[in-house]
Image: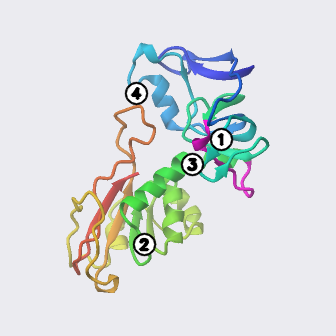
Amino acid sequence: MTIAVVASAYGGPEVLAVIDEELGAPGRGQVLVDVLAAAANPADYKMYSGAFGRDPSKLPIRLGFEAAGVVAAVGEDAEGPAGAVHPGDDVIAYRIQGGYASQVMVPASAVVPKPSTLSFEEASGLLLTGATAAHALIATAVAAGDTVVVHGASGGVGSMAVQLAVIAGARVIATAGESSHAYLRQLGAQPVSYGDGLRSASMPWTTTGSTQPSTRSAPTKRSTPRSHWSRTATVSPPSPPSSEDPSSGSESSAAGRAPTPEPRFATVHA
């Protein structure tokens, strides 16, 4: 028997309830995880508040898109992205539904090994924000030598994007309130307060080139060596999601390196 948090209706926290549930044994390709930590994300609230829709047929709603714990049992052919999953493995489960529970049954494909350097609490909140940030940088094809502007850089997705861009060898300009500047410097970014200072910090070449967002939908093959041109990618906060997909805000509005010596912006909503 497991206990789980569900939303029995749409609304505020008052619609949440704790229930007992019998999960049974894992089927083929399934993994039963003893949850030791679960992440709380804005998408959870949007789910039960009705921001993603108010279809009564979907009630009650199990909450929690990511969790970390220990594998309790596995079904046949339990193969995850990193290989076979075994009882006793420390894992992260993402993307799932129902992480707010003492146990959760998930597809083996949603289970990856927990890094040994992270606690269960840290690992439980790693992948929703981390995957969103990684997708943003992939969509804009950020690489060494680029300048990346990350808006809301001290938040979950923003701080992940900063670190991944720095690892990729990019120069990172990070917008945030002054209280977060020291933290962002530790991550390797150049912090900038919101306002007029951003333009001069991110575009020292402001007298040349276009500052209009690119309208390309995917990176294009380069025919000009990187040393012959410059590019700035910006990562911005999300627009409100329009579906129940917790990452539906991760929508590429533009990307791409154009074979031109002029700098241009590539933007992506993270």
Q: Residues within 10 Å of mark 3 (few under 14, many from 20)?
A: many
Q: Earlier in the sequence, mark 1 or mark 2?
A: 1
Q: What's the residue at 32%, 52% (across, down)? A: 252
From the image, tell me which residue sits under label 2. 143
Q: Of circles 3 and 4, which is in front?
A: 3
Q: Find out whether residue 3 is within the magenta segment.
A: no
Tell me the amino acid under the disc marked 1: Ala
Which region is colored magenta? 107-119
Q: What's the residue at 47%, 18% (across, down)? A: 11
Q: Earlier in the sequence, mark 2 or mark 3?
A: 3
Tag 1–tag 4 contact (CB < 8 Å)? no
Q: Is residue 26 above or below residue 151?
A: above
From the image, tell me which residue sits under label 3. 127
Label 2 sits on a secondary structure element that is: loop
User: For residue 27, what is the image quadrant?
Assistant: top right
Left or right: where does residue 250 sit relative to residue 126?
left
Q: Of circles 2 and 4, which is in front?
A: 2
Label 4 sits on a secondary structure element that is: loop
Distance from disc 1 to disc 2, alpha carbons, whole Å, reads 35 Å
Tell me the amino acid under the disc marked 4: Ala
Q: Earlier in the sequence, mark 3 or mark 1?
A: 1
From the image, tell me which residue sits under label 4. 51
Tell me the amino acid under the disc marked 2: Ala
Q: Residues within 10 Å of mark 2 (few under 14, many from 20)?
A: some
Q: Is residue 23 above or below residue 177?
A: above
Distance from disc 1 to disc 4, alpha carbons, whole Å, reads 34 Å
Say the numbered circle drawn on residue 209: none
Tell me the amino acid under the disc marked 3: Leu
- Note whether residue 270 is visible: yes
Q: Of circles 1 and 4, which is in front?
A: 1
Q: Residues within 10 Å of mark 1 (few under 14, many from 20)?
A: many
From the image, tell me which residue sits under label 1. 78
